[in-house]
Amino acid sequence: MIQAVMVMSTQGKPRLLKFYSFQPPEKHQDLVRGVFQLLSARPDSVSNFVQADAIFGPGVKLVYKHLATLYFVFVFDSSENELAMLDLVQVFVETLDKCFKNVCELDVVFNFNKLHTILDEMILGGQVIETSSEQIMRSVEEIARLEKQSNTTSLIPKSISERFSR
């Protein structure tokens, strides 16, 4: 099961935190700090898989991808395949690239709702539900279309709104 997804800057600032197993809110900062210290000390030439027993408990691993100024981190237990998780990180990053046309830290900061939507289309309750970047983008575009349509729908009947607009 996937226990958490984190996107953090290379300065250690969390840009996205999503926990699928309960972690007390007061512990979130300690977890982020522990993951950042672990990742920032690793050279670029080593494996992207890290045993995270000291941070999350026994049997927990994390896989990460370091791109530009961001770390994309997936935390998972022994029931998940490491390579499948690495592929899932890649799908997440590819989907963000399609969505934002070469994703950067500012896209993550100012469009966190869209990030959560993409993540919710991929993972539900710690289980992977979709791995196709194209299908995820279709779903996100449909959600955006429906949101736009609902924002333009007026709850006031047209005859009343016309009377007051004059």
Image (cartoon, rainbow, N blue to C red):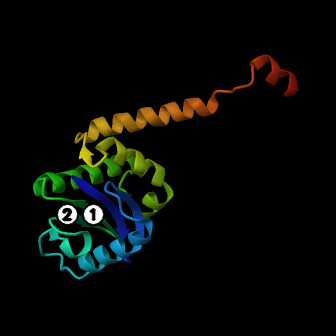
The amino acid marked with disc number 1 is: Val
Question: Which residue shows up at 37% across the image and 34% down it?
Answer: 139
Label 1 vs 2, first from the N-terminus: 2
Label 1: few (<14), some (14–19) or many (≥20) C-alpha neighbours in 10 Å: many
Label 1 vs label 2: CA separation? Answer: 6 Å
Badge 1 marks a residue whose secondary structure is: strand
Where's residue 148, x and y in %?
Answer: 55, 34
Instruction: Residue under label 2, please give it.
Output: 63
Residue 152 position by quadrant: top right
Q: Which mark is residue 73?
A: 1
Circles 1 and 2, Cβ within 8 Å, touching? The answer is: yes
Task: Tell me the quarter of the image containing the C terminus.
Answer: top right
Label 2: few (<14), some (14–19) or many (≥20) C-alpha neighbours in 10 Å: many
Where's residue 78, x and y in %?
Answer: 13, 58
Badge 2 marks a residue whose secondary structure is: strand
Q: Which is nearer the eye, 140 or 49?
A: 49
Question: Which residue shows up at 25% across the image and 40% down it?
Answer: 129
Side of 37 relative to 86 (left or right):
right
Q: Which is nearer the eye, 24 or 62?
A: 24
Question: Which residue shows up at 34% across the image and 51% down it?
Answer: 96
Question: Which residue shows up at 40% across the image and 73% down it?
Answer: 29
The amino acid marked with disc number 2 is: Val
